Amino acid sequence: MERYFEFEKHNTSYRQEFIAGLTTFLAMAYILFVNAFILADAGMDPGAVFVATALASALGCLIMGLWAKYPIALAPGMGLNAFFAYTVVLGMGIPWQAALAGVMVSGLIFFILTLTKVRETIINAIPLQLKLAAGAGIGFFIAFIGMQNAGIIVADEVTLVQLGELMTPSTLLAIFGLVITALFMIRGFKGGIFYGMILTALAGMVVGIVSMPSAIVSSIPSLAPTFGAAIAYPLSHPEQFFTAQMLVVIFTFLFVDFFDTAGTLMAVANQAGFLKNNKLPRASRALSSDSVATVVGAVLGTSTTTSYIESSAGVAAGGRTGFTSVVVAGLFLVALFFSPLLEIFLENPGLTSPALIIVGVLMAGALGSIEWNKLEFALPAFVTIIAMPLTYSIATGIALGFIMYPLTKIFKGEYKDVHPIMYVMFFIFLAYFIWLVE
């Protein structure tokens, strides 16, 4: 094992790699509960989603660790799960089974693109400013959902939204959780979000807001409610799946995963010193980990699986080989037996709200890299960002940004700088708004 992972070459050991894997797992363990909570809003069985999340994460980590040999962990992505539940299922009215099929198809396409040069062409065609805007916009959208779940922001007939009753016990608990999680994060705790969730739940139990769990450990919940739905639904309801609307959904899944994965891989690889001449060795293997885990995860019953930036916590703790990812995979499998804790988070939305808000803050960091002094970039970026929370749709934000960008470049007289692929996207999304959006 030491020889396979080249411990000596990377100046590491079993102990160092295990600590790194544990650190990464604690930094991202919140996804087990948050993902089940979000997808439950789409009508999916939370127990089955919990199991699918753990299994898809474990598979992705194993492929990344054993094949690509990188200390990068994977799990269903934040933002992609929100798009799945709130935009596709609740917003567009697409059944969650069809949405899972869309995730599966996007994973298959991603895998094919990874094996060809098409991936690089598409990445180069889309301007950096739109990629940054998409990430920041998703951050705002996730934070908005977190504030809604916490009761900090509520609906209003006149102004659409307003400040909620902050003295409500559940809202106060969510605010406490946000403060505690922020404290952990600012002080540099690697598993700050996870620790914040646990401490908030304990505080809620002490004051009587949160009920004690019926158990801590139990048998693994059944996958039956979601398993295979991604395959069965398109076969039994082809007229509801093979539509132009689903094409937009699949493209958005693909787009967000495309750049989220690439950005995370490059960031963590750079931190660990893996980049050579600004290129990542075995990049196709690393990207294949995401796509394979996405396909299998969709069949099991969860949204898109992607590389996690929290892997940087493990790298900071000394993780340098794929054994770190193997450790994370093992811990996700162990977590399968702790499903009774899920009921606490499902019954108390405020417990997951701090995690959503903090993740939103981290994703919004992309704002700083946008060239706001150039209107040809600033306008499409702003439209992309603001449209996501205001229309409650990640897809709408991306579509509007893709329409606005070619126009601003044409007005600037720089139409030749726009890649032909962007003009194709312009007409596709324009047609989408004209004929398909009700």
Image (cartoon, rainbow, N blue to C red):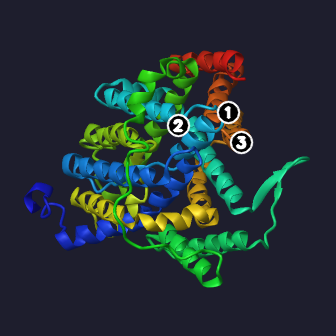
Disc 3 versus disc 1: distance between alpha carbons? 10 Å
Mark 1 or mark 2: name the one nearer the start of the chain: 2
**Rendering coords of residue 378 (x, y %):** 69, 37
As displayed, is residue 138 above or below residue 432? below
Q: Nearer the viewer, residue 425 or 38?
A: 38
As displayed, is residue 202 above or below residue 345? below
Q: Amino acid at mark 3?
A: Ile
- Which image quarter: residue 289? top left
Tell me if mark 1 has few (under 14), some (14-19) or many (20+) residues whose alpha carbon lies within 10 angstroms of its own: many
Q: Name the residue at 22% across, 51% down.
A: 69
Q: Amino acid at mark 1?
A: Pro
Q: Nearer the viewer, mark 3 or mark 1?
A: 3
Q: Nearer the viewer, residue 238 or 60?
A: 238
Q: Which dot marks residue 96?
A: 2
**Rendering coords of residue 293 (x, y %):** 33, 42
- Can see residue 394? no
Q: Name the residue at 61% across, 74% down.
A: 210
State left or right for residue 306 relative to residue 80: left
**Rendering coords of residue 192 (x, y %):** 49, 71
Q: Which residue is mark 1?
A: 380
Disc 1 versus disc 2: distance between alpha carbons? 30 Å
Disc 2 versus disc 3: distance between alpha carbons? 26 Å
Q: Are marks 2 and 3 in contact (CB under 8 Å)?
A: no
Q: Name the residue at 65% across, 48% down.
A: 141
Mark 3 or mark 1: name the one nearer the start of the chain: 1
Q: Nearer the viewer, mark 1 or mark 2?
A: 2
Q: Nearer the viewer, residue 4 or 303?
A: 303
As displayed, is residue 263 above or below residue 186? above
Q: Name the residue at 56% across, 61% down.
A: 346
State left or right for residue 289 relative to residue 434: left
Tell me if mark 2 has few (under 14), some (14-19) or many (20+) residues whose alpha carbon lies within 10 angstroms of its own: many
Q: Which residue is mark 3?
A: 386
